[in-house]
Amino acid sequence: MARTKRPKPVHQLTIAQFESIFPDEEACKAYLVARRWPQGVHCPRCGSTHVYALKTMAFKWECMDCSEGISYRFSHIAGTIFENTNKPLRDWYRVTHMMLTSKKGMSALQIMRTMGFGSYKTAWYMCHRIRTALVERDMDKLGGIVEVDETFIGGKDKNKHADKRGRGGKHAPSTKTPIIGAIQRKGNVVTRVLQSVNSVDAQAFVREVVSNKVSLLATDESNVYRSLTGYPHETVHHAAHQYVIGAVHTNTIEGFWSIFKRGIVGSFHKVSRKYMPLYVAEFQFRYNNRFNADIFGAVIEGC
């Protein structure tokens, strides 16, 4: 029986291609307008298409429908992550390109060194703004064979300073950050940062992101999925060294966790619970767009 070839991740923009497409700031502005308003410029405040380009100011328009007889002037960056910043678009594009082409992420410190920014705060601020554009919303529910699993990010309590450990001695709850994820075989992944892993939150996540028409829902033996109903649910017992039973396994979602954890350990070293959703969103976006040849354009379109 002939085996079907798995599609390979597509090549993203090389440095040479990037320099050719974006030779100057004007090219960057034109690209943003084309990606942001493919059907024509409309007002970012009211959505009206009754706008006029200002002849004396490039990349600026005036909306005649905003408020009562008061026009509204806006530019190509109004309402985007680039608004109210003093960095040129070309720098934003370069940082975005570096974040997308690095499989395990790139730290703000490394971006500061590469870009020659004067402060770490500038690089950190730009990276977080870009991550907000990578948050995927209104995703379709996962179907086919879906794997669900949870993981925990953070060091062991015994290795932390006393004021960073969980309260209550050695039996205290872990201070690690719990994350739950669901992945469709050969498809997309959806992740969520939780306050704690319990059956209520875990099952609510599954019902939100997984279609009830899936052919199989595979999890490990965790108790949080035990009372889950309405799905063809099968489990593998990792504690008993049971990892694969036919089509039942969680290897795909664990592969995603491996990529994410290698990024945390190797690139970022430490991520607080407060900003964990943004880092998870970055890795999720890169994974879900691994076959998208226009991944850079997709980011700019969502900015």
Image (cartoon, rainbow, N blue to C red):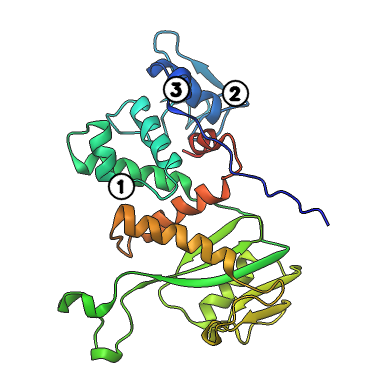
As rendered, which of 185 and 295 lies closer to the eye?
185
Q: Is residue 290 left or right of residue 110?
A: right
Q: Is residue 271 left or right of residue 60?
A: left
Residue 48, percent across and down? 57, 30
Q: Which mark is residue 16?
A: 3
Residue at the (50%, 54%) spot, across then down: 284
Which structural element holds mark 3? Answer: helix
Q: Which mark is residue 40?
A: 2
Task: Tell which circle, 2 or 1, labels the residue nearer the N-terminal end.
Answer: 2
Q: Which mark is residue 107?
A: 1
User: Where's the N terminus, which quadrant?
Assistant: bottom right
Q: Disc 1 marks which amino acid?
A: Ser
Give the class, few, some or many, for how many residues have Cα within 10 Å of label 2's Cα (few <14, many ≥20). Answer: few
C-alpha distance separating marks 2 and 1: 36 Å
Q: Quadrant of residue 206?
A: bottom right
Residue 49, percent across and down? 59, 26
Give the class, few, some or many, for how many residues have Cα within 10 Å of label 3's Cα (few <14, many ≥20). Answer: few
Which structural element holds mark 2? Answer: loop
Residue at the (57%, 45%) spot, across then down: 289
Going by the picture, which residue comes out furthest to the top? 56
Give the class, few, some or many, for how many residues have Cα within 10 Å of label 1's Cα (few <14, many ≥20). Answer: some
Q: Disc 3 marks which amino acid?
A: Ala
Q: Nearer the viewer, mark 2 or mark 3?
A: 3
Q: Disc 2 marks which amino acid?
A: Gly
